[in-house]
Amino acid sequence: MSENPDDERLEELREQKMQELQEQAQGQGDQEAQQAAQEQAERQQEALLKQYLTDGARQRLNAVEMSKPDFAKQVKQQVTALARSGRVNGRIDEDQMKELLRELQPEQKSFDIRRR
């Protein structure tokens, strides 16, 4: 005696759902691994910044981060790249950080509004 066509369809749907759940679980595992790798990279970056920046320079960078987080992220990446390439002699002090911020700051457009 053969199975009912509805039973066959139900079994197919169960298998399909099980496969979707397994793929979803695997995707979440990949996402968690990617997040862990990103956190590890951030910790390494912070360690390099602590090593190569003086307290004054770190305070200046933190102040910039409060007002312009994207710009501060760019500066951190630049300092990290400089440190890894060996182009940082000693530690970066506050004056050097100011100069670096000026160099990396995007040019601002000024608008003059005149009333007639």
Image (spheres, rainbow, N blue to C red):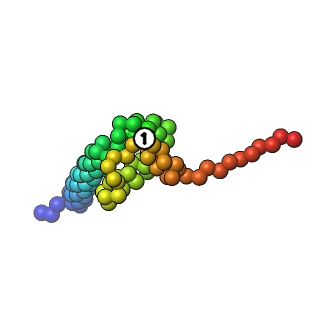
Residue 35, given in percent of the width and then of the height, sits at 28, 49
Q: Residue at x 39, y 43 (%)?
A: 93
Q: Residue at x 35, y 43 (%)?
A: 53
Residue 29, given in percent of the width and then of the height, sits at 23, 51
Total numbered circles: 1
Residue 50, given in percent of the width and then of the height, sits at 30, 42
Q: Amino acid at mark 1?
A: Glu
Residue furthest bottom in the image: 2
The residue identified by callout 1 is 94
Q: Residues within 10 Å of mark 1 (few under 14, many from 20)?
A: some
Q: Residue at x 45, y 36 (%)?
A: 63
Residue 47 visible = yes
- Quadrant position of residue 88: bottom left
SS at circle 1? helix
Quadrant for the C terminus, please. Answer: top right
Residue furthest right in the image: 116
Q: Camera-side residue: 9 or 66?
A: 66
Quadrant for the N terminus, please. Answer: bottom left
Q: Camera-side residue: 108 or 88?
A: 88
Q: Residue at x 27, y 48 (%)?
A: 44
Residue 28 visible = no
Q: Camera-side residue: 72 or 35?
A: 72
Asked whether, in this view, residue 76 is left or right of residue 42, the answer is right
Q: Camera-side residue: 65 or 88?
A: 88
Residue 86, given in percent of the width and then of the height, sits at 31, 58
